[in-house]
Image (cartoon, helix red, strand yellow):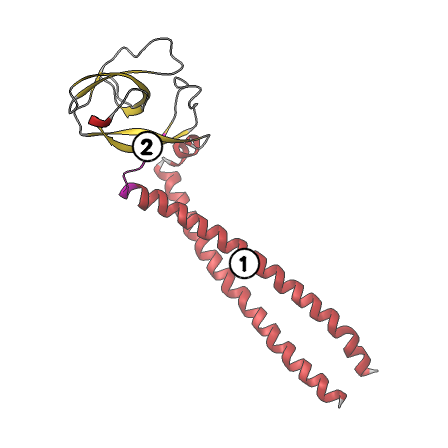
């Protein structure tokens, strides 16, 4: 009787244990993947992008619809002012303004080393009233647009919110590592116990 009970409950208990271990492995993989992606995004934005001089500019107005809309995120890369051409979207601070604009170049005058830009918002009926004289050697130009991400960037530009996100990132990585370590120990103990119990049942059957 004792032997039949052991053989009847053993497989069921083993299946449950395997299911728990499999679920834990899936959760560990999800947590590890999430932490890895978060770390890669953090490194890309905080380390790689500045090294490559890649910029991020949130869109505040609808002057460039339909190319991009308020709340979108512009990704920019530096370009030599001598290489600028009509049709490109340059990011610059116009005369008399305190914030940068990202408008399309419609005409270029002046010299190649000190061009004078005429620009226009795609949604505006007329060209901009200013003519931007570029004294620098390079200017950011738009190379890609990410819809709806600019609003999130504006939100995290606050020092307090940036500090909270940094702390949350650190806690997520630390918590994932601790959780993985703690969850690995019971699985090892279960395998060790299962091996000993199997040997005890074999000896009892003999």
Residue 87 among magenta residues: no
Q: Is residue 9 above or below residue 64?
A: below
Which residue lies under the disc numbered 1? 28
- Which label is found at residue 76? 2
Measuring 77% from the left and 73% from the top, which residue is drawn there?
9
User: Left or right: 120 with respect to 190?
Assistant: left
Question: Which class describes the residues within 10 Å of circle 1: few (<14), some (14-19), or many (20+)?
Answer: some
Residue at the extreme top of the image, as rendered: 126
Q: Quadrant of the C terminus?
A: bottom right
Residue 19 in percent (x, y) is at 66, 63
Q: Which range is magenta?
A: 50-57
Residue at the extreme right of the image, as rendered: 1
Measuring 49% from the left and 56% from the top, which residue is drawn there?
32
Question: Which class describes the residues within 10 Å of circle 2: few (<14), some (14-19), or many (20+)?
Answer: many
Q: In this view, does 164 lie above or below 134?
A: below
State which quadrant residue 192 falls in.
bottom right
């Amino acid at each position: 009787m004792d032997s039949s009970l052991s053989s009847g409950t053993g497989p069921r208990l083993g299946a449950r244990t395997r299911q728990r271990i499999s679920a834990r492995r899936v959760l560990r993989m999800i947590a590890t993947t999430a932490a890895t992606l978060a770390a890669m995004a953090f490194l890309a934005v905080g380390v790689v992008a500045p090294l490559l001089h890649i910029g991020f500019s949130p869109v505040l107005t609808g002057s460039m619809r339909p190319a991009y809309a308020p709340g979108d995120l512009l990704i920019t890369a530096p370009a030599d002012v001598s290489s600028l051409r009509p049709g490109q979207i340059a990011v610059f601070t116009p005369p008399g303004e305190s914030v940068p604009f990202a408008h399309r170049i419609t005409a270029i005058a002046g010299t190649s080393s000190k061009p004078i830009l005429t620009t226009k918002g795609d949604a505006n009926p007329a060209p901009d009233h200013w003519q931007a004289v570029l004294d620098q050697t390079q200017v950011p130009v738009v190379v890609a647009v990410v819809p709806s991400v600019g609003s999130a960037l504006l939100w995290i530009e606050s020092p307090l919110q940036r500090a909270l996100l940094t702390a949350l990132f650190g806690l997520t990585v630390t918590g994932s590592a601790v959780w993985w370590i703690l969850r690995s120990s019971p699985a090892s103990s279960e395998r060790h116990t299962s091996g000993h119990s199997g040997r005890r049942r074999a000896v009892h059957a003999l």
